[in-house]
Every structure is written in structure tokens, then in C-alpha cells.
Image (cartoon, helix red, strand yellow):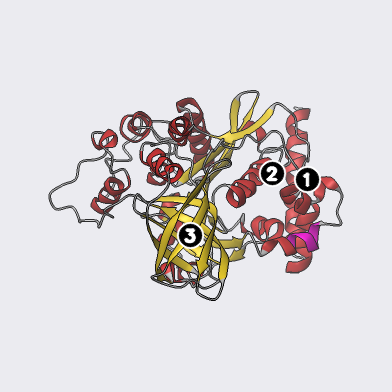
Amino acid sequence: MLKKFRSRLRKLLHVSIRKLISWLPRNQRFAVFRSFADCNPAPSKRLVLKIAETKEELEACFSVLHDAYVDSGFMKPDPSGMRVTIYHALPTTTTLCAKYDGEVVGTISLVRESALGVPLQTIFDLTPLRQKEGFIAEVSALAVHRKFRKTGGSILFPLMKFMYEYCTTFFDTRHLVIAVNPSHIEMYESLLFFKRLTATMVEKYDFVNGAPAIGATVDLKEVLDTFREHYASKPPHRNLYAYFTQVKMPNIQFPSRRFFTTNDPVLTPELLDHFFNVQTKTFENLNERQKALLHSIYDLPAYWKILPALPDSAEVIPIRRHQRFSVRCPARIVVATSDERQEIVMEVIEVSRYGLQARARDPLPLNTWCDLTVQVGRSDVAHFRALALRENENGFNGFYGFRLGEPDVVWQKFVSALYRSTTYNDLDAATRFLN
């Protein structure tokens, strides 16, 4: 009886404090919220953060997500006990998980923009954001296990740190977007400095069972100065600037990559079939365009039999003749003229069997053969001749497409490994023949 009374008293006190804070001016209210931030720079070794990659880990993530969404009214209970969406099926989506004593207790999915876009683009216009430099990813499917929801961010903050480091170091993502319930938006605005996409709220967002939603975004590069301004002088457990940018957290297990790729796909044909055909009816419930796009993404024989069948009337989706792969490889190109020899720093961002795309710091001469050096991995460097063919790829100055001359053995094996792989573990195994 006494325990119930104390619980009700704490809840009443919590509600009263929230009401008092809500009456403060916006700047003061946000300052109060930031004063509540409590991030442990050295969490327990029992906590592990990693990419969800096994069937058991993915099932646990989708189950934690399902329970959190049902509890919040964002979805109706599903017979599978999991929340699985078409975006989870994409190789450009990475699901992160937090495990405590081996049990998944938190999850978050990063959905980088692809042929299917991102979930919130159905209700928010991302055109202004797409006109800026840098790739976009939606922070989606965030959930914490019931028994850890009242622990003061002991799971949430490590997940957020993992997300930040993964996006900036591995995922080649600069702009994060979110669609959140109005009751949660001020946490993102005050603590993490998200900015609203529009001034108005969407009254009904079908992706979360018709609940209202507010869209917001943050530029992971530009926001660092704001973080430094508001947090740098605070003690370690409240200094989110140091927490995100300086603290080294051994609890985080980053993916092992030999090559400088930017995706970490984990879904084998067997896992796709298990989650999207057997456990749920996600593939069956797709519209014709979504089915066609899925076929264009997984245009490999191993996946054909488990993808949803295409009706004769399905929309034809243009498919590139040669598959392309997202990478982030440091490079330099030597432009030699009769007067001088100029070396220009570049970054290769996309690779296909017969070409590549790169962004250069300085203008490049078009239709001129040059010497190109690309560091495709930690210990693998390729050298060959290349021809810059076009400028302004993706609408930005500094982007070039290249035709390759005679690629060396390192480049040929690098590209072959990409084509032979369906998951990042496959890629790691495929690189062994480079040695």
C-alpha cells in the first residue's frame, strides 16, 4: 500500500514539475531541460552497443519496438509481436541495438535516403534539405525496453552516442531527420538542437497509427558549435559535447570493415524471408511501386524467389545497367599540363564495375586523362588512369563522374568483392582473396 502511495506521489510531483516548466519562456525552459541531461561517460561493462545482425538480435529489436509503440498508441498489436516495416528491409538501413547482460534493451534504426526515400517524406517536404550538401538519414524506430524507460537515459544516451559516431564515421550521413510526437519534440530541440522542418504539426501520421507528428532536422556538422557553446563548461556527466565528440566508449562495437564502404547490410535472403514473409506480411502488403523498387534494389538471383511477385501491370522502375555501391574513399588525382603538375584531393563516393563518382575540392578539367590514386581500404590503395566526364552530379558543384582506363589489380579485386557480397559479413569474407 505504501509503495503504491509513493509511486502515485512521485507521478503527481513529476506532472506538477512539468507543468511549472511549461510556463517558462522557451529559452529558460530549454535551459532547464539541458540541466536534466545525465550521460554517464563510463557505463557498466554489462552494456554493449552494436549493429543488430543475427536473427535473434533483430527479433529482439523488433519486439522491443513493437511493445514500445503499442504502449504509446503508435500501432495496434501485431500477431508477430514485432514491428517490421519495409524500410527495415533495405540495405541502406542500419538497426543499432543496446544489449544489457546479453538481452536487447534498446534499439534505433537509421534509414538513409534511397530509392524508397525515408518514411517522413510522405508528410514533410525535404526539398530544401536535399538542396544542401550531405546525405540524409531518418532516425526511426527508437525504443527502450519497459524496465529501462525510467532509468534516466542509461540506455537512451549511449544509443544516441552510438548513432552520432556511426553516422559521422561510418554511414556518411550529415543531416538527420525525425518525425516525433509533439510531446517529445522539445527534448530533441533543447538537448540535441533539432530544428523543425515546418512550423505546423501534422495532425495524422499514418506511419504511427494516425498519431500527430512534428518533423525536425539537425546538421551533424554545423551543430557542433552549438553543442560546444551550451555544454562544454558543464561537468562530465552533463557535458553532451564531450560525450558525443571526445569520450571513447569501449561498450560500442563498431563494424569491422576492410574497405571504406558506407552501408552495413545484414539481411541475407533467409533473414528477409523470415521477417518479411513468414513472421509478418510486410512484403505481401506492399503496393506495386514498392515491390518493383524492391526488385531493383535486390536484383540478385539469391533474392528473387523470396521477393514479392510482380504483377504484369506493375510499374516499370528504371534500373541502372550496372549496380552501384556507396563508398567513402580518400583519393587524389594528378592533372599534368605542359606547364605544371597539379595534385587535387578528392573523395570517391560511388563505385560501379566500369566507373566511379567523386567530389573534388578544386575544379577538374573534363575529358582529360589523369592519374588517379584511391585508398579503397585501410591497407589497400589502387592506382590507374581516369577521365572526368561530367560535373555537378546530384546538383552540387564539385561532383564528377569518371571513366576508368585500365584499373590495377587492387581496384579490380575491390569491385569484384563488392559484387560478390550481399551483407557486410560477406564482404569481409570476400576480401580474403585480395591477399
Q: Position of residue 236 (x, y in %)?
A: 84, 46
Image location of residue 122, percent across then percent down:
40, 60
Q: Which circle, 1 or 3, is nearer the viewer?
A: 3
Q: Position of residue 393 (x, y in %)?
A: 42, 68
Q: Is residue 229 magenta?
A: yes
Tell me where residue 277 sits by quadrant.
top left
Residue 371's label in the rendered image is 3
Mark 1–mark 3 CB contact (< 8 Å): no
| Amino acid identity at mark 2 | Phe
Q: Secondary structure at mark 1?
A: loop
Q: Secondary structure at mark 2?
A: helix
Label pair 2/1, CB-CB below 8 angstroms: yes
Which stretch appears magenta? 226-231
For residue 306, above or below residue 128: above
Extreme top residue here?
Answer: 101
Residue at the far bottom: name it: 339
**On the image, numbered disc 2 is attached to which residue?**
157
Which residue is tagged 1?
38
Q: Nearer the viewer, residue 170 or 36?
A: 170
Rate crowding at label 3 as few (under 14), some (14 to 19) or many (20 or more) other CA atoms within 10 Å: some
